[in-house]
Image (cartoon, rainbow, N blue to C red):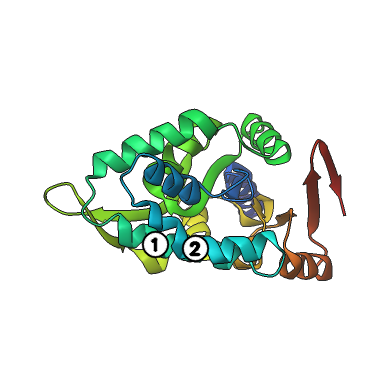
């Protein structure tokens, strides 16, 4: 009898530990929450302020036009912008970058999708631990995420030298570029239950991250993510103008 009570107590304790695990919600930021790319907006601001030369745009303009004409991929456009940002930011004081980021957020932080904005608010109220995952610079991702109520933000950490100037390199780049690795780390670090957790993304690059949770959401997906999501029975949500609908 005593052994039975002990076994029941052990099972009850196990169930209690399972219930106590956090529910986590991971959101890709650029194109999923923010209706653009934080890095692209930062580049444009640095050009406008004369910190980056006007010719900076020429490095990614062709890909931008191809994307507008639906002949190229948005990802190619962003990758070109990332490359030029890393090159042009070299030697610029870190404080200058932070100041430009503050200007961008002051003017554009509310340019978000209604669906993900409201979902973030709802999940926050339900006790989810919210993490933001982005390849944009951490010094703009962090404040942006904080303004929306995220608990933790992950972004590209652009290194600075002893004089406080950007070197153009990214610390821990291989880790930061792997969203699935970041989410796996967060699930473990914050003792979250993957099956009860949510992840939201918009491109095929987010698939490895979405696969880690019990409730993946493909939001405004590109074709590759859409096909994968439909094949695997994931939730697909589209927002156009002021209409939000599931596919």
Q: Are marks 2 and 1 in contact (CB under 8 Å)?
A: yes
Residue 29 percent across, percent down from the top left: 56, 48
Disc 1 residue crowd, few under 14, some 14–19, many 20+, Cα 10 Å: some
Q: Is residue 206 visible?
A: no
Number of callouts: 2
Residue 72 percent across, percent down from the top left: 65, 69
Gap between marks 2 and 1 measured at Cα = 8 Å
Position of residue 227 in the picture relative to residue 128 (left or right): right
Q: Nearer the viewer, residue 179 or 72?
A: 72
Residue 14 percent across, percent down from the top left: 60, 51
Q: Which residue is mark 2?
A: 60
The residue under the point 50% across, 30% down is 107
Q: Residue furthest left?
A: 162
Q: Nearer the viewer, residue 40 or 163?
A: 40
Q: Nearer the viewer, residue 156 or 85?
A: 85
Q: Which residue is mark 1?
A: 84
Position of residue 117 in the picture relative to residue 175 (left or right): right
The residue under the point 63% across, 54% down is 7
Q: Is residue 206 above or below residue 141?
A: below
Return the disc, 2 or 1, that comes first in the chain's sequence.
Answer: 2
The numbered disc on residue 146 is none
Disc 2 residue crowd, few under 14, some 14–19, many 20+, Cα 10 Å: some
The residue under the point 33% across, 63% down is 172
SS for tag 2? helix
Q: Is residue 70 visible?
A: yes
SS for tag 1? helix
Tell me the quadrant of the picture where the C terminus can be found: bottom right
């Amino acid at each position: 009898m005593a052994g039975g009570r002990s076994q029941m107590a052990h099972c009850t304790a196990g169930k209690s530990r399972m219930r106590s695990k956090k529910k986590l919600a991971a959101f890709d930021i650029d194109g999923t929450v923010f209706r653009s790319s934080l890095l692209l907006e930062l580049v444009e601001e640095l050009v406008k302020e004369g910190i980056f030369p006007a010719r900076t745009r020429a490095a990614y303009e062709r890909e931008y036009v191809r994307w507008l004409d639906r002949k190229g991929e948005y990802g190619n456009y962003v990758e070109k912008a990332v490359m030029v940002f890393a090159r042009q930011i070299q030697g610029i004081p870190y404080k200058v970058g932070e100041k430009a980021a503050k200007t961008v957020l002051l003017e554009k932080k509310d340019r978000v999708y209604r669906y993900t904005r409201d979902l973030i608010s709802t999940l926050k109220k339900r006790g989810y631990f919210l993490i933001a995952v982005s390849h944009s610079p951490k010094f703009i991702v962090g404040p942006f995420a904080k303004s929306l109520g995220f608990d933790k933000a992950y972004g590209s950490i652009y290194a600075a030298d002893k004089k406080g100037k950007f070197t153009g390199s990214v610390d821990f780049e291989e880790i930061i570029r792997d969203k699935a690795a970041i989410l796996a780390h967060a699930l473990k670090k914050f003792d979250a239950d993957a099956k009860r957790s949510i992840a939201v993304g918009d491109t095929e690059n987010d698939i490895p991250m979405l696969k880690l949770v019990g409730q993946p959401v493909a939001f405004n997906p590109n074709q590759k993510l859409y096909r994968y999501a439909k094949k695997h029975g994931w939730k697909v949500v589209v927002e156009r103008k002021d209409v939000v609908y599931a596919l």
